[in-house]
């Protein structure tokens, strides 16, 4: 899920940057691409996921308020980033190498 979300952030961010959007949207898309790269390698996943949620919701709001495009994809991306921020990066990530893999052990009854 982390790889799918990160590749979607990078792909849609690059596609939006190529269309020469307004400056505020351009800055938000560049932040989104950076968040996608960090999510791709699994670096600072909870922090970057939270940042990505805020950025994607701002992009969705700017598209909705200016009627310049569909706000559906940024909302879906925001939901995926929120899930990643809550779930974590997984075993194959830089976060797991730096901080150790987090596990939840349930006691037996």
Image: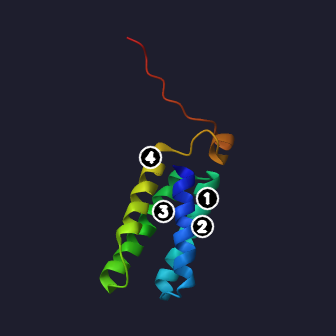
Q: Residues within 10 Å of mark 2 (few under 14, many from 20)?
A: some
Mark seen at residue 86: 4
- Residue found 32% across the figure and 84% down from its top: 67
Q: Quadrant of residue 74?
A: bottom left
Identify the image quadrant of the C terminus: top left
Distance from disc 4 to disc 2, alpha carbons, whole Å, reads 19 Å
- Residue found 67% across the figure and 47% down from its top: 94
Distance from disc 4 to disc 3, alpha carbons, whole Å, reads 13 Å
Task: Name the residue carrying label 3.
Answer: 51
- Residue found 33% across the figure and 86% down from its top: 66
From the viewer's side, name the closer residue of 13 and 50: 13
From the viewer's side, name the closer residue of 19 and 98: 19
Task: Give SS at disc 1.
Answer: helix
Mark earlier in primary sequence (4, 2): 2
Q: Residues within 10 Å of mark 1 (few under 14, many from 20)?
A: some
Q: Residues within 10 Å of mark 4 (few under 14, many from 20)?
A: few
Distance from disc 1 to disc 2, alpha carbons, whole Å, reads 6 Å
Mark seen at residue 34: 2
- Residue found 55% across the figure and 81% down from its top: 17
Task: Give SS at disc 4.
Answer: helix
Locate residue 97, reporting x and y percent.
68, 41
The answer to whether the residues at label 1 and label 2 have Cβ atoms under 8 Å apart is yes
Task: Name the residue carrying label 1.
Answer: 38
Locate residue 20, reporting x and y percent.
53, 88
């Amino acid at each position: 899920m982390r790889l799918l979300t990160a590749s979607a952030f990078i792909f849609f961010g690059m596609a939006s940057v190529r269309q020469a959007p307004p400056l505020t949207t351009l800055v938000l898309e560049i932040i989104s691409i950076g968040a996608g790269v960090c999510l791709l390698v699994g670096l600072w996943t909870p922090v970057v996921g939270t940042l990505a949620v805020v950025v994607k919701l701002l992009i969705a709001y700017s598209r909705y308020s200016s009627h310049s495009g569909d706000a559906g994809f940024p909302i879906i991306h925001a939901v995926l980033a929120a899930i990643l921020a809550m779930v974590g990066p997984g075993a194959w990530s830089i976060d797991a190498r730096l901080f150790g893999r987090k596990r939840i052990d349930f006691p037996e009854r």
